[in-house]
Amino acid sequence: MGRVEALPSSLNELSKPVRHLFYAGEVRLLDLPMVAIVGSRKPSAYTRQVTLRLAQALSARGVIVVSGGAMGVDAVAHQGAFPNTIAVLANGLDRYYPKINEPLLRSIKEKALMLSEYPEGTIALKHSFVERNRIVVALSLATVIAQADLQSGSMQSAKIALELGRPLYVLPQRLGESDGTNLLLKEQKATLIDDIEWFAQQFGEALHVKEDALLAFCKQDPRLEKCLEKFGNKVYEYELEGRLSIEGAWVVPHG
């Protein structure tokens, strides 16, 4: 763990300044283009699926996905982009909150990047989530609100993005399932993402990266038994990192 020596200049635009940032992991990620993806802690299955694809598309172009480490949309965004992801926490870097996300947060801490403006030992309080949100938005070239109720922290993030003059995007949603994002569209404050490739291409070029051997094998033979036979516990490590899902006797690669 350490302290970011030179804070990103984008943070200077905030009305409440960030005086310092503590970090754990790959601090070099701060030098790459960043896009925030945030949203409901209880997203629909559809929102989870599209958020995962969106994060993967950005990561495949070398774009870093920034989010808040929370349950739901945040966790899916981190998993889809891993290891090209930054988690900004509302507590000290020595604490893992929410507890259910501890395996994911530990992976981000070790192989991606974790940030906080709070020193070790600090617990998350109601106001610190709002303060965290301002950093997530300010670091990013644009913010995606995947799904949100009218009264939610994600809508506060939308407000921050609009105040900073940053582009705001939302996913297509059915009536009654995401009243917050539908309102942003109605008021013409956000742009609809109706093409994931179109969106991702605005922030980075597709990278020609050699396909991961484990993921390639699972695409050819998705039986869990066979994947474990060839790669052992590495399969479970990939699951914790969000690079694949284990669904009964089958493995579903995310990359």
Image: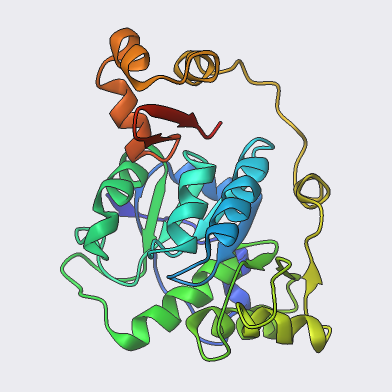
Q: Quadrant of residue 89?
A: bottom left
Asked whether, in this view, residue 84 is left or right of residue 41, the answer is right
Q: Is residue 10 visible?
A: yes
Asked whether, in this view, residue 201 is left or right of residue 144, the answer is right
Residue 102 placement (x, y as % from top left): 25, 53
Residue 77 placement (x, y as % from top left): 52, 53
Residue 153 placement (x, y as % from top left): 49, 82
Q: Quadrant of the C terminus?
A: top right
Q: Quadrant of residue 11?
A: bottom right
Residue at the limit of the structure toward the top, as seen here: 230
Q: Quadrant of residue 115?
A: bottom left
Q: In this figure, what is the number of numbered marks?
A: 0
The chosen color scheme is: rainbow
Residue at the limit of the structure toward the front, as seen here: 249
Asked whether, in this view, residue 95 is left or right of residue 243, the answer is left
Q: Is residue 32 visible?
A: no
Q: Nearer the viewer, residue 21 or 242?
A: 242
Residue 204 placement (x, y as % from top left): 75, 42
Question: Which residue is at 64% across, 20% downward?
Answer: 209
Question: Which residue is at 38% across, 38% downward?
Answer: 241
Residue 15, above or below 52: below
Question: Which residue is at 63% across, 53% downward?
Answer: 50
Question: Which residue is at 70% across, 28% downward?
Answer: 207
